[in-house]
Image: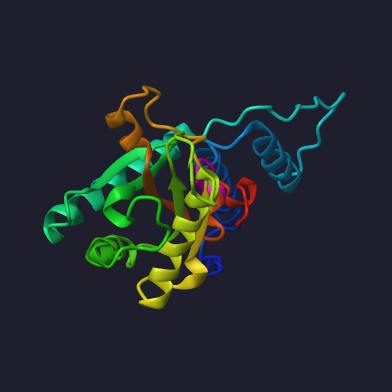
Amino acid sequence: MTKRPKKQDPGAPAWMVTFSDMVTLLLTFFVLLLSMANMDKIKFEEAAGSLRSAFGVMGGGSQTSISKPKVVEFAPIQDDFTSRLYQRMLSQINQLKIDRRIQLVKDRGAVILRVDAAVLFASGQTEVSPEAYPILQDVAALIENLPLNLRIEGHTDDTPTSGLALSNWDISIARAVSTLKFFERESLVPLDRMSAVGYGSRRPLATEKNEAAQALNRRVEFVLESIGGNREALPYLIDAGKQVPF
């Protein structure tokens, strides 16, 4: 009598299924290791511990504690973002033929639009001059489509304000607020994206006592800040909560 061949179960052998699962888990493990290559040591150890538990590997002996690092380096993120934003705005300035009295600079790890105070205000005055309206409209055109907040900073020189009721500090604050009000009144920038602060003569660009240096210190700066959760990714941006309120 001829032997009938033994009937085999359809599909892959049982050992192949187990082997495939193991290979998939190993691949996932190494992908996670690669993706976490730039994480700090604390988070990396926590993730590695979770993976060891998932694979059923129990750690033996004493657990090594890792202290939280005191300094976290964010320079690559800062430099990359600042450079890209600076180049984008520089290109916009060239395309829109923005007033040349608007100076684009990288300062304090952020991108800043800097305008001479004499362009925006008459001497000793705190209300924006009508002649400055087109310049402020140019500033708004540069930032209106960017997902960033705008902080307006007023600065003065250290010349005493003789004969005026306002101090240099008062003037710097009033000018920043006046500029903010213009943007809001003309619907150029949403109010919830703006803030204003004055520094008086406390942050000079030049320390010389000649007129050219003093004129350089009299300025209004438009500092671009991150919105919402982006602050954690861009920690170099200035914290408005630490500034002097107006």
209 sits left or right of 12 in the view: left
Rendered view: 32 above or below 93: above
Q: Position of residue 84 (x, y in %)?
A: 30, 46
Q: Position of residue 151 (x, y in %)?
A: 47, 55
In which quadrant of the rendered view does residue 125 lie?
bottom left
Residue nearest the observer in this picture, 114 or 75 = 114
Q: Quadrant of the C terminus?
A: bottom right
146 sits left or right of 201 in the view: left
41 sits left or right of 56 in the view: left
Q: Position of residue 135 (x, y in %)?
A: 24, 61
In which quadrant of the rendered view does residue 58 lie?
top right
Residue 141, can we see it? no
Q: Residue at x 36, y 45 (%)?
A: 219
Residue nearest the observer in this picture, 111 or 16 = 111
Q: Which residues are magenta?
A: 232-237
Rendered view: 209 above or below 225: above
Residue nearest the observer in this picture, 102 or 33 = 102
Most common SS among magenta residues:
loop
Asked whether residue 2 is drawn in magenta, I would say no
Q: How many numbered marks, from 0 up?
A: 0
Q: Residue at x 60, y 47 (%)?
A: 243
